[in-house]
Image (cartoon, helix red, strand yellow):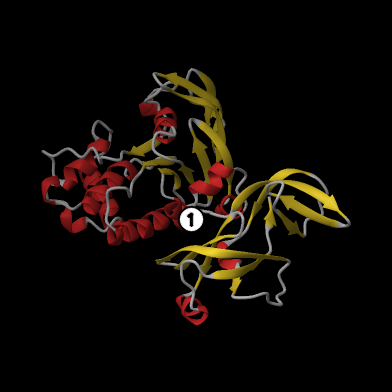
Amino acid sequence: MLELRGISKRMAGFSLRDVSFGVEQGDYFILLGESGAGKSMILETIAGLVAPDSGTILLNGKDITSEKIQNRTIGMVFQDHAIFPHLTVEGNIAYSLHGADIPKEEKKRRVKAIASELGIRELLKRRPGTLSGGELQRVSLGRTLIQHPSVLLLDEPLSSLDTRLKSDLRRLLRSINRNGQTIVHVTHDYEEAISLATRIAVINQGTIIQTGTPSEVFSHPKSEFVANFIGLKNFFKVTLVRDQDVTYACLSDQFRVITDTGLSSGEGFILIREEEIQISLGEAETGLINHFNGRIVEIVQNSRGVDVTIDAGFELHALITRESLSKLDLETGTACWVHFNPTVM
């Protein structure tokens, strides 16, 4: 439905390079990357606010690369809301219909309908200065959705909201998407991407480095950057070596990990999932194929459990329960064994 082919744009100190991806009808497509990666510039290029130096933008098979903004049937919600302070909520939402050949009563009906859908009908007579951040975001959404855009572009829509408001707006955005609205949403928050996306593109320094479903991207990162960005800690570049019918992933000349891959040689990555590492105080019989002795260097409790950092000649992070921490009586400096199976990427 929406396709970018080889979009490049050079600006002072930054450039987009050969950006290509496709968004299907009904997708919730998230562009995920750090601040300054080029996410917002891609949105502005799709919307027609920035002209690319090269490349093509197609919407439903039509080339819209040079199309006027008002003819693109694409709506964009800006990070700062861009609400008119002198207009009421009703006036802000209705502003998008200004100049359209629509009877006044029909405009009022549409405004009330979209306000009801967004849960802000009771705010229609209010001024923006009296609204919360979440309410302002809904007004901004309403002003854009009333145009029935083919694609809705969202620039960091949750970044300025507190945790409760973020949760509320996520539910609203999922509902809008389930009702058939195609959405392209940029964010730096991978948890936001997990909770909303049907497809994800990860961008770094103006280049798309991986695309796929959330499961594909988060379970099978294709680079160290993607792994580190999404919070995977035990991700290592390795050389695969076959020795006496066993394939090893060599982290260095001194350390190698047994794998169950069918590959016999080559370069690649291994992921050792934090939650799948077992810790024991001595050698133990387990169903896991790797066993390393080490020493605990840090213990940090977090919302997911307890992050235990182990020096096994290379740094490993294990995620265990608070009950396991207490049962094993672990503390900084404790000698231990770690047991795990890696995943080869």
Residue at the (37%, 37%) spot, across then down? 75
- Secondary structure at badge 1 equals helix
Point out residue 297 in the picture as x, y percentages from the top left corner: 49, 61
In this rendering, does residue 27 appear at all? no
Q: How many marks?
A: 1
Residue situated furthest right in the rendering: 244
Instruction: Return the residue nearer the eye: 225 or 100.
Output: 225
Point out residue 285 in the picture as x, y percentages from the top left corner: 71, 77
Q: Residue under label 1, please give it.
A: 194
In this rendering, does residue 65 appear at all? yes
Q: Is residue 309 above or below residue 218?
A: below
> Residue 96 lies in what quarter of the image?
top left
Residue situated furthest bottom in the rendering: 327
Point out residue 134 in the picture as x, y percentages from the top left corner: 25, 53
Instruction: Return the residue nearer the eye: 253 or 303.
Output: 253
**Tag 1: residue type?**
Ile
Point out residue 148 in the picture as x, y percentages from the top left corner: 38, 42
Q: Quadrant of the N terminus?
A: top right
Residue at the (35%, 44%) spot, across then down? 156
